[in-house]
Amino acid sequence: MTAATFSGTRVLFAFVGSRQYLAMRAIQRESSVPSVLVDLAGGQALEDDLDSGVDAGTFEHLMQPGVRGLFESLFLSRRLKSEGMQPDVVVLGQDIGAPARAFAQAFIRSGASYALLQDGALAFPGVTNRIPLLRRAETLLATARLLRPTSGHFGSSRPDVILTWGHGWTELFTRSAPGVALEACGWPPHDLLSADTACPKEFVLVCSQPVWLPAFGLTNAEVSGYYSALTELTHVPGVKIRLHPIERSEHQHVPESLLRADTSKSMTFETQMQLASAVCAPASSTLVEAGAAGVGVAPLDYGQRFAVVRSNMVGISHLSVGVDIGTTKPSDFAAVCIARAGDYRARGIQEVLQDFVRTDGSCTIRAARVIDLLAAR
């Protein structure tokens, strides 16, 4: 490519995974300024016509782990700059991972504004990096101003603005990102939700998570027990399993039969959510989204482990009682989940969660306006 390939680009949307892609692509369509989408995990800027035919499974790959992913991001930003990329605004979907922050910093140092698009539920206190070599690499790069530093809290990389899901997150971001402008835009993919609440409810949707991560506090034996129980549910009528992107990309803990039963590649979460009679998950943003949209929610438990994780998560900390996947008979699982969801519905869960997720159909328009104003500064 020539040095003029990206000349005139005003906004750079940098995403990881299909979830961030779908949100950023929606904003890009609504925005009035020239922009480019960059797949950080794939290491490429997308062609203009790629959106035709893109589905939930298009961007399955995640960032390379550790130091390798960090330096691949640095090289990608350098290559794009050599091809003429110098945007007025760079937009990220997360700032917890070092590779995304390293990529963005290359353009921020050259004068770009920086916007952060909330892409899920958030834990507090923040995430810490447990890999010594990566910690040292991050420290060295941050000292050299090649990496946007963070305390491990979402938003602590000091963006110019955070586009949040709703006003319910204000207290969290005031603590984790003091002084940063907050815009309660909502999550753009929610604009696609049907207003027809009477659509047929076909199944209980279980949104799994990579429970081997330290935050869940499970032993290796407990991780194996969790996935064995989850695998048993694949044979139960009326239950569908949706795996997390990390489970699909780092699946050494996930049985092959469970990978085959995963429904995430066939449709987006938003579509599945509307067809579900209840959404179950250990400690996930899917509970916030489903509850706010009026879909039943039933937290998933494995002993008391997941309830402890939820208690530290804004938006779902009050979802203390769940359905124990380890002790509930597979044949009873769907009925128990629906009953638990009914309990939470009776307690007014939708009204509580609607403060955390705007679902008025204008999320994309609001987000695009914020990005356009930032580009015009």
Image (cartoon, helix red, strand yellow):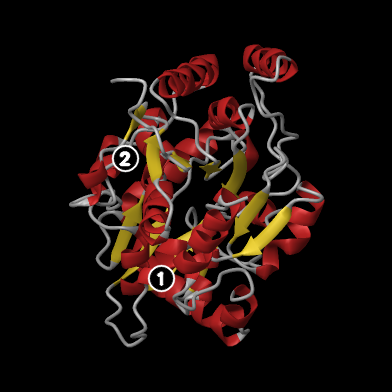
Closer to us: 244 or 13: 13
Give the mark, 2 or 1, whose residue is nearer the N terminus: 2
**Residue type marked 2:** Phe
Decide if residue 368 is on the left or right side of residue 265: right
Q: Residues within 10 Å of mark 2 (few under 14, many from 20)?
A: many
For the question of whether residue 317 can be seen, the reply is: no
Q: In the figure, 375 relative to 86: above or below?
A: below
Closer to us: 90 or 5: 5
For the question of whether residue 212 can be seen, the reply is: yes
Residue that mark 2 sits on: 59
Location of residue 62 by image quarter: top left
Q: Secondary structure at mark 2?
A: loop
Residue found 45% across the figure and 65% down from its top: 364
Q: In the figure, 53 relative to 205: above or below?
A: above
Residue 114, given in percent of the width and then of the height, sits at 61, 42
Residue found 43% across the figure and 38% down from its top: 16
**Residue type marked 1:** Asp
Closer to us: 219 or 39: 39
Residue found 70% across the figure and 31% down from its top: 128
In the picture, the quarter occupied by the N terminus is: top left
Q: CA distance from mark 2 to mark 1?
A: 21 Å
Q: In the figure, 344 relative to 309: above or below?
A: below
Q: In the figure, 218 relative to 238: above or below?
A: above
Residue 366, given in percent of the width and then of the height, sits at 52, 67
Residue 369, given in percent of the width and then of the height, sits at 52, 63
Q: Residues within 10 Å of mark 1 (few under 14, many from 20)?
A: many
Do the residues bearing badges 2 and 1 touch, measured as CB atoms within 8 Å? no
Label drawn at residue 191: 1
Residue 195, given in percent of the width and then of the height, sits at 37, 83
